[in-house]
């Protein structure tokens, strides 16, 4: 994900210098990005970041669920301690003017009684129920505190809805590639997504025109989960609410995929956000609305499926 | 169509389906081919069902599904014409475009009054439009119910939602009595309950939307509530658990509403734009307008009760 951002930034002549910091070497071939191999939890990143003399810092990835080989304690560590170290590094770097965080709309939660569209001021309407939500809450608090103490730095907290696109391994892409997608019996939540292309461009737009505080990022409109499954041609099986957790745990145990607690709530109650601030203040209008993002995903999927089956059966 | 014609069409359909499947077509393809044996109306319905199966149907950002509403149309039409014999007056008081807030009395446990209100505007208004409903939040935790409400244009009753909807220049229907109205005992029928804190008036003032009071007569008799089972309500987490002459004794049959006679009157709109959006903070004005709406509805209720005469014949 960071690789795609770096590639996008280095192609743009507006950006004189691009540096990337990660534990993993970028998979993409980058031309002029200086890559710093470091762990965000390591206090030494402070000197490394200061040495780059950058004016904008993008915190591009918070961990959404503990993946293979990562315990939930590590996830918390990377998310919260990592953000803390990054902010310390920003404090040391005198040139920093903007900080942009790719956060999550997960902080709003998924609630049956929730407003149909969350505005940026509604982050704490409901208690933070999951570990991930509490992580995001803590990260948001850290950045809010930093922003108060350093009024000269513009901190933008981008609250992303789940992404869907051709390339990346996102939660919805994984869900839609399960052999049979489990759904909650009798529920058809409104889902709102952001296409990966828009996710990237919104981030770049924010780097160019930062605003203070939180900004929701999502494709306009919503789509019912049933309609989404039908458009992508995925078979689904409805599961009664009380049994859903055991089924989801079973799916994880046989190694098909992991539905995080946040994602399970999303499949039951859904969530949508209001994107007025993104459009009017940041000045970025997502190109693909939510149904269009799903249609794009479906078209690419069937496209590749036909291509591969064409190769498998030579005529 | 005679019943013999129906059987022949069904047999033709099944034969066509088998032939298509044997010739190697997949199921949707086979259904489409076999549907040529059916009469036109049925064929259209099969085609629509297939299209919906591939996810090709519109939903707006609120999850409102107009096609779904039209699909259940025949049932609602039957209830409207035959079952409840709805008579509508004053439909010209509903603005044909632009934002407006309908405020109606609420009764009858299940929101049949909302459905009939929507249908009345669809059928009687020169510029028909679908009103959106503000629904008690408890309903959104329920399986199936929550989906049906969403597809019919219902949203959680919260100022966030009603503000956004009115700013989009929609027609929004609200039942200011809330659960108190729907759950009142039979003996208290047609006596309006307290109107909460006047939140609907605040929203109307902030958006400058006119308020159209609506009096619905007939909904009070469809489920005469004789008592309550508070323990069941506690177990289900429901606001109340009604006991009627038929529910829960007859099981699902107990949810069939009684065939009372209905009258719906749309009253003259109360303009709010003249007060300006700041007036929403004026408690006295909000409560005054709220009381004005309440009195209008109460007056029209009694008037229409007299006009209607006996409840069931």
Image: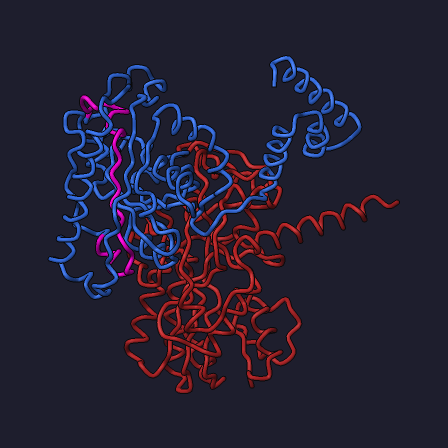
Chain colours: A red, B blue
Which quarter of the picture shows residue A16?
bottom right
B279 on left or right of B28: left
Residue B133 appears in the figure: yes
Between B272 and B70, the one lying in front of the other is B272
Q: Is residue A179 visible?
A: no
Q: Please give left or right for residue A143 compared with residue B276 in the image.
A: right
Q: Which residues are magenta?
A: B201-229
- Residue ID at (53%, 46%): B58
Say above or below: A288 vs B114: below
Residue B307, how many percent across, how many down? 22, 30
Where is B228 relative to A64, above or below?
Answer: above
In the image, residue B120 above or below residue B248: below
Q: Position of residue B246 (x, y in %)?
A: 28, 17
Q: Is residue B276 above or below residue B302?
A: below
Q: Horizontal and vertical percent for residue B194? A: 14, 42
Q: Is residue A276 within the magenta segment?
A: no
């Amino acid at each position: 994900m960071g690789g795609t951002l770096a590639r996008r930034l280095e192609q743009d002549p507006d950006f004189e210098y691009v540096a990337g910091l990660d534990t993993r070497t970028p998979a993409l071939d980058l031309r002029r990005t200086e890559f710093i191999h470091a762990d965000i939890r390591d206090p030494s990143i402070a000197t490394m970041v200061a040495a780059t003399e950058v004016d904008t810092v993008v915190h591009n990835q918070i961990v959404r669920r503990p993946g293979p080989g990562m315990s939930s304690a590590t996830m918390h560590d990377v998310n919260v301690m990592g953000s803390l170290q990054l902010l310390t590094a920003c404090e040391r770097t005198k040139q920093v003017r903007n900080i942009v965080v790719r956060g999550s709309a997960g902080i709003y939660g998924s609630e049956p009684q929730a407003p149909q569209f969350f505005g940026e001021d509604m982050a704490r309407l409901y208690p933070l129920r999951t570990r991930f939500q509490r992580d995001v809450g803590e990260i948001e608090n850290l950045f809010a505190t930093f922003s108060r103490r350093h009024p000269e730095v513009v901190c933008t907290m981008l609250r992303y809805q789940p992404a869907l696109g051709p390339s990346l391994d996102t939660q919805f892409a994984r869900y839609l590639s399960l052999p049979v997608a489990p759904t909650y019996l009798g529920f058809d939540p409104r889902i709102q997504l952001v296409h990966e292309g828009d996710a990237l461009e919104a981030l770049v737009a924010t780097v160019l025109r930062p605003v203070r505080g939180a900004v929701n990022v999502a494709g306009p409109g919503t789509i019912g989960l049933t309609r989404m499954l039908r458009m992508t041609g995925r078979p689904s099986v409805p599961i009664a609410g009380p049994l859903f957790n055991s089924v989801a745990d079973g799916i994880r145990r046989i190694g098909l995929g992991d539905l995080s607690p946040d994602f399970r709530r999303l499949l039951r109650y859904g969530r949508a956000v209001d994107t007025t601030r993104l459009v009017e203040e940041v000045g970025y209008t997502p190109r693909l609305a939510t149904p269009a993002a799903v249609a794009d995903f479906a078209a690419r999927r069937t496209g590749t499926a036909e291509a591969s089956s064409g190769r498998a059966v030579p005529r | 169509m005679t019943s013999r014609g129906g059987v022949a069409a069904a047999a033709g359909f099944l034969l066509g389906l088998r032939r298509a499947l044997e010739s190697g077509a997949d199921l949707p393809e086979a259904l489409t081919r076999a549907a040529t044996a059916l009469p036109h109306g049925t064929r259209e319905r099969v085609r629509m069902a297939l299209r919906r199966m591939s996810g090709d149907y519109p939903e707006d950002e609120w999850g409102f599904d107009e096609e779904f509403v039209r699909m259940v149309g025949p049932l609602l039409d039957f209830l409207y014409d035959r079952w409840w014999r709805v008579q509508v007056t004053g439909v010209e008081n509903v603005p044909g475009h632009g934002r407006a807030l309908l405020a109606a009395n609420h009764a009858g446990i299940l929101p049949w009054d909302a459905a009939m209100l929507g249908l009345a505007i669809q059928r009687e208004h020169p510029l028909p439009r679908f009103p959106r409903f503000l629904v008690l939040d408890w309903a959104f935790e329920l399986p199936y119910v929550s989906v049906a409400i969403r597809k019919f244009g219902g949203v959680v009753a919260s100022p966030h939602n009603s503000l956004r909807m009115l700013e989009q220049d929609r027609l929004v229907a609200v039942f200011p009595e809330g659960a108190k109205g729907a759950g009142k005992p039979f003996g208290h029928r047609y006596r309006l309950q307290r109107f909460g804190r006047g939140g609907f008036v605040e929203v109307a003032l902030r958006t400058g939307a006119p308020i159209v009071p609506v009096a619905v007569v007939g909904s009070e008799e469809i489920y005469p509530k004789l008592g309550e089972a508070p323990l069941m309500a506690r177990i289900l987490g429901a606001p109340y658990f009604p006991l009627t002459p038929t529910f829960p004794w007859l099981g699902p049959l107990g949810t069939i509403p009684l065939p009372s006679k209905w009258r719906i009157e749309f009253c003259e709109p109360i303009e709010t734009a003249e007060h300006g959006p700041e007036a929403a903070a004026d408690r006295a004005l909000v409560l005054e307008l709220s009381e004005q709406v309440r009195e209008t509805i109460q007056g029209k209720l009694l008037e229409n009760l007299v006009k209607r005469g006996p409840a069931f014949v």
